[in-house]
């Protein structure tokens, strides 16, 4: 294993635990965005988090006719800028996402984002940081 740091997409691919996320990002046409300069903060749900969604949800979302809905969900997982775990420790805030919505970040007992627990924090990438979460963030309402 080398210490080479990759962009967010290549890091997620190399990790092997984000195949559903990578497929969704590809289906939504966000690969180039997330390979861009950034910096970005990405809350990356594991394959297990996607598997916990109701049966058929992922298959439905990756259909071309649902691209806008999929894109909106994925952009909930992206914050503009690079936010490390230490930046939110002990704080509670509503952060603006790349899609214009907000997510509730609570750093008072570990870190949660809209209730999803950050299970691995601060995975450095050339264009930002990945925090692994245990649930998929969905739009409110």
Image (cartoon, grey):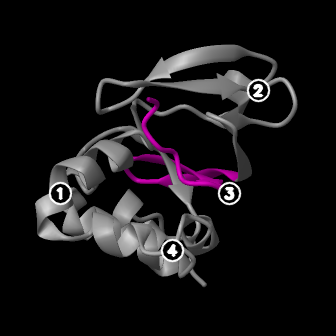
> Magenta stretch: residue 124 in it?
yes
Q: Are marks 1 and 4 in contact (CB under 8 Å)?
A: no
Q: Secondary structure at mark 2?
A: loop
Whole-angstrom CA distance, mark 1 to mark 4, is 19 Å
What range of the chain is rendered magenta? 120-141
Quarter location, residue 59? bottom left
Q: Nearer the viewer, mark 3 or mark 1?
A: 1
Whole-angstrom CA distance, mark 3 to mark 1, is 23 Å
Q: Secondary structure at mark 4?
A: loop
Q: Nearer the viewer, mark 1 or mark 4?
A: 4
Q: Residues within 10 Å of mark 3 (few under 14, many from 20)?
A: many
Whole-angstrom CA distance, mark 4 to mark 3, is 17 Å
State the mark number for residue 67. 1
* Mark 3 or mark 2: whose residue is earlier in sequence: 2
In terms of depth relative to the viewer, which is nearer, 43 or 76?
76
Where is residue 76? Give x, y as percent: 41, 39
Q: Secondary structure at mark 3?
A: loop
Q: Residues within 10 Å of mark 4 (few under 14, many from 20)?
A: few
């Amino acid at each position: 294993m080398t210490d080479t740091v990759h962009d967010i997409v290549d890091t997620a691919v190399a990790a092997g635990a984000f195949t559903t996320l990578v497929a969704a990002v590809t289906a939504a046409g966000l690969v180039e965005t997330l390979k861009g300069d950034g910096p970005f903060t990405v809350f990356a749900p594991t394959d297990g988090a996607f598997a916990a969604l109701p049966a058929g949800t992922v298959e439905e979302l990756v259909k071309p006719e649902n691209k806008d809905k999929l894109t909106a969900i994925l952009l909930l997982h992206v914050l503009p800028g690079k936010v490390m775990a230490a930046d939110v420790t002990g704080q509670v805030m509503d952060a603006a996402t790349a899609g214009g919505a907000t997510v509730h970040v609570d750093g008072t007992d570990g870190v949660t984002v809209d209730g999803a627990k950050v299970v691995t924090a601060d995975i450095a990438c050339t264009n930002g940081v990945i925090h692994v979460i245990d649930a998929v963030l969905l739009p409110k309402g």
